[in-house]
Amino acid sequence: MATFFEQLINGLTIGSFYALVALGYSMVFGVMKLINFAHGDLFALGSYLGYTLLIASSSWVTVHFGLWGGMALAMLFAFTGIGFAGVLMERVAYRPVYPAGRLSLVVSALGMSIFLQNGIMAIWGSRPQAYPAAVVPSARFSLLGLPVTSLQVVILVVSFALMLSIWFIVEKTTFGAAIRATALDRSTATLMGIDVRVVIFFIFALGPALGGIAGVMNGMYYRAISFNMGWT
């Protein structure tokens, strides 16, 4: 029974950061009806951004912020960087082909996926990289008699906090109502005075940003990252 609950915690931990990836993807698909093939590669890019921050300044981060501060800094860096990348991707790759129909958007998304995947490979190389052990929290303790790591607890808490925040924004705020209206019928939402451009900006910033944080969690949990992990 102890083994079952231990594996249950492992599954919840892994599932929680994959849920963030899925949540970001579903936000884009729900509003744009776009199969965003590049979303997984933004997840991979977020993992590499966190890795680069921790590698480039591992000693400085550890000294000034500690393990937890370094982890938070890496997540914030990936969140911001991938949010910006998502907005830029929408402006460059998707917005110009909106009038051409959904098939053109799918082809553009495939092109962005190939571009991002090869860009990661060109910058960081084709070999897998590893998050440094010195900046990954690894303390173990017993929770209700079950062995857990501090990293698992942090991943679960941060993931569920983000999911609850998104639920609150979408379901309980006026702007969330605008998002739901845009997802149901973009033309009617425009006639009702909703600025659809702001909604699109929001989902293309927040959706990929959630994937960026999940990428850092994935890198810290598994340690190894690769340029094609997002596509896989």
Image (cartoon, rainbow, N blue to C red):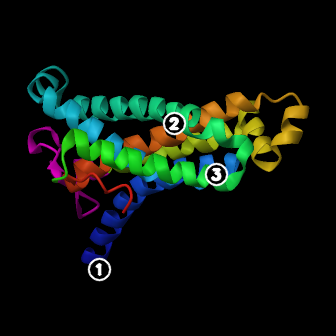
Between residue 72 and residue 119, name the one nearer to us: 119
Q: Mark 1: which secondary structure?
A: loop
Q: Earlier in the sequence, mark 2 or mark 3?
A: 2
User: Which of the labelled discs sits on residue 104, or is there none?
Assistant: 3
Between residue 71 and residue 197, name the one nearer to us: 197
**x then y, percent, for residue 66:** 17, 28
User: Which of the labelled discs sits on residue 66, or is there none?
Assistant: none
Residue underneath mark 1: 1
Camera-side mark, 2 or 1: 2
Q: Earlier in the sequence, mark 3 or mark 1?
A: 1
Q: Mark 3: which secondary structure?
A: helix
Q: Quadrant of the C terminus?
A: bottom left
Between residue 119 and residue 46, name the one nearer to us: 119
Q: Check residue 6 for magenta coloring.
A: no
Between residue 163 and residue 202, name the one nearer to us: 202
Tell me the amino acid under the disc marked 1: Met
How far apart in space, not on screen, are marks 2 and 3 (Cα)? 15 Å
